[in-house]
Image (cartoon, rainbow, N blue to C red):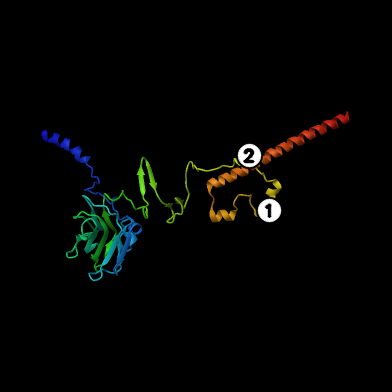
Amino acid sequence: MKRILLFLLLGPLSFYAQVITTNRNPVGLEHNILFRAENRYTVTQTGTASLPTARLFDGKLTVNYTSTPPGFSDPTVILIEGLPAVHTQVGGWVGWSTRHWGAVRFKIEGYDTFGTPNGWRVLADYSGTDYNGNDFVAKVAQSGRYIKLRYTFYTGSAGDGRLGVSELFFIHPEATSPYEGLYQVTGSDGWESGNGTLFYEGNVGIGTMSPDSPLAVNGVIHSKEVRVDLEGWSDFVFEEDYDLPTLEEVEAHIKEKGHLKDIPGAREVKENGVLLGEMDAKLLQKIEELTLYTIQQQKLIETLLLQNKKQQEEIDNLKK
């Protein structure tokens, strides 16, 4: 009976157990500071057997293969410089991943600026012994402030020694926010969150790799409401000193330009698009001008009706 009760007590505890990322125990790659390294840092590569560096830091884990095998006399060396000068404290991890043709002989080094003198430290070394696996991760044994990393690959596990690498990573929980860099951050720009908001300093592109404004969308935006903040509106049309164009002037402008005054033509719209707030203000200006024309015409109609009524009364009196 006691054994049954013990099982019932312990069973649910193990069922609800959860492993989370901590300073000493990273679970995933969310604190990898090498995401989009080619945009955020300085990445250089040497060696005849080259890898597409941009794809080694994009988080997709798509494998990349060298077209020729590296060697001890001509290794594939990838150097990342300009990393944040943040001490690893209780935990930092370096490594690589692939699907096939993992590295057999390789070395990972870091340039430490914390100690005196500054210098390169070996973080993982399989240059003298074979490694068997398609992924590798090692905790940085010597904590420090590593501002450079150097990955040196001597041989791969393909039959002819070629190499496959999907991702290079440096997991540094205290130097980055989760997944920072995956949004192609450049310079000091970055995502910040707090109080239920998400903030980004820079241009964001949706459907475009070259956004030219804070938000550039190459496609359709589906929304229930769009709010545009404006300075100034078109109510100046109703001011007494507003110079309302005559209809003759409007007609002459249309014949000459092919569009209303202050409204862009079809060619300009095709080349430059339109600013919604500015265009709404201009369209309202034309609507208010039309309103004034209508009021003028209504007054003219009423005057003509009154004149017509008087003339009719005079005619009727003459007939009597």
Comparing 172 with 239, the one in front is 239
Residue 133, image x and y in percent?
A: 21, 59
> Between disc 2 and disc 1, whose residue precedes?
2
Q: Can the viewer see residue 132?
A: no
Q: Residue furthest top?
A: 320
Disc number placed over residue 52 in the picture, else none: none
Residue 279, image x and y in percent?
A: 56, 47
Figure check: 310 above or below 225: above
In what element is the residue under mark 1?
A: helix
- At label 2, the amino acid type is Phe
Residue 17, image x and y in percent?
A: 22, 41
Q: Is residue 302 left or right of residue 263?
A: right
- At label 1, the amino acid type is Lys
Q: Is residue 214 left or right of residue 300?
A: left
* 2 or 1: mark nearer the eye: 2
Comparing 221 with 257, the one in front is 257
Label 2 crowd bin: few (<14), some (14–19), many (20+), radius 10 Å: some
Disc number placed over residue 238 in the picture, else none: 2
Q: Circle 1 is placed at which residue position?
A: 255
Label 1 crowd bin: few (<14), some (14–19), many (20+), radius 10 Å: few
Give the tally of numbered discs: 2
Comparing 150 with 312, the one in front is 150
Name the quadrant of the C terminus: top right
Comparing 51 with 172, the one in front is 172
Kindly indicate whether the residue at mark 1 contacts the one at mark 2 (C-beta within 8 angstroms). no
Name the quadrant of the N terminus: top left
Q: Tell me the distance, in whole angstroms, between the alpha carbons under discs 2 and 1.
A: 26 Å
Q: Quadrant of residue 39?
A: bottom left
Figure check: 40 above or below 297: below
The residue at the point 22 percent across, 50 percent down is 89
Q: Can the viewer see residue 223?
A: yes
The residue at the point 27 percent across, 56 percent down is 169
